[in-house]
Amino acid sequence: MAYWLMKSEPAEFSIDDLVKAKNQTVPWFGVRNYLARNFMRDQMKIGDDVLFYHSSCPEPGIAGRALVSSPAYPDPTQFEKKGKYFDAKATPETPRWMLVDVKLAKKTRLLSLAEMRSILSLEEMVILQRGNRLSITPVKANEWKTIIKLLG
DNA sequence: GCCAACGTTGGC
DNA sequence: GCCAACGTTGGC
């Protein structure tokens, strides 16, 4: 079983949106980075644990836990001609962007980026590394354990 | 608004 | 295939 951290801008889709979503599940649409896509397409399995992270907002940090709840399938937004995620080079026969469904496990207190930075055992987390911008990153088992403890 | 860091694009 | 220019991310 693997652990992941997935970033979302709360102005676009927040943990509260996930709480209110149908089946408390959302297709993780809009990823347009190959490495992040490959994680979803090649490595994620149903039941993998996910940290739901709020980025580009006044208080960035972990806002909840979730689970991978589907296999990878084509991101429908790549075919929406008028949408912001349209990709002219993608076709239904040869889709370029894949996603998984993410289901809420629990909304938690906000574990802020500042607090994460203060925890020694989290210092190797990918998200805390200088210049890291990847929207989906693997989390190590010990990091997951530490974070779950901090979330209470 | 600034800017560091990184990914992508496109000319050659 | 190289690499400069450009665009984006995302914290501050």
Image: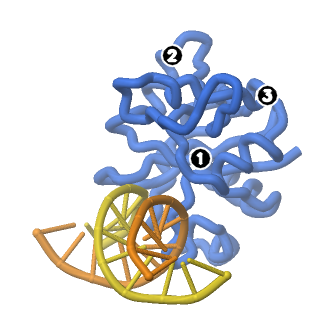
Chain colours: A blue, B orange, C yellow
Per the model, the C-alpha gap separating discs 1 and 3 is 16 Å
Q: Is residue A96 above or below residue A35?
A: above
Q: Residue at x 64, y 68 (%)?
A: A126
Residue highlighted by disc 1: A6
Q: Which amino acid does label 3 sit on?
A: Pro
Q: Which amino acid does label 2 sit on?
A: Ala
Question: Between A63 and C3, which is closer to the camera in this rendering?
Answer: C3
Instruction: Determine whether the residue tagged by mark 1 lies in a helix, strand or loop.
Output: strand
Labels 2 and 3: the sequence-earlier one: 2
Instruction: Determine whether the residue tagged by mark 2 lies in a helix, strand or loop.
Output: loop
Place of residue A51 in the rendered image (x, y in percent of width and height, measured from the top left): 63, 45
Place of residue A26 in the rendered image (x, y in percent of width and height, measured from the top left): 57, 24
Return the chain for callout 3. Answer: A
Labels 1 and 3: the sequence-earlier one: 1
Per the model, the C-alpha gap separating discs 1 and 2 is 17 Å
Kindly identify which numbered label has been placed on residue A71.
3
Asked if labels 3 and 2 touch by Cβ distance under 8 angstroms, the answer is no
Q: What residue type is labelled 1?
A: Met
Q: In this view, does A44 lie to the left or right of A123?
A: right
Per the model, the C-alpha gap separating discs 2 and 3 is 19 Å
Place of residue A109 in the rendered image (x, y in percent of width and height, measured from the top left): 50, 42
Name the outermost residue toward the top: A22
Kindly identify which numbered label has been placed on residue A90.
none
Work out whether residue A47 can be spotted. Answer: yes
Q: Is residue A129 left or right of residue A140?
A: left
Q: Mark 2 or mark 3: which is in front?
A: 3
Tag 2: Cα neighbours inside 10 Å, few (<14), some, or many (≥20)?
few
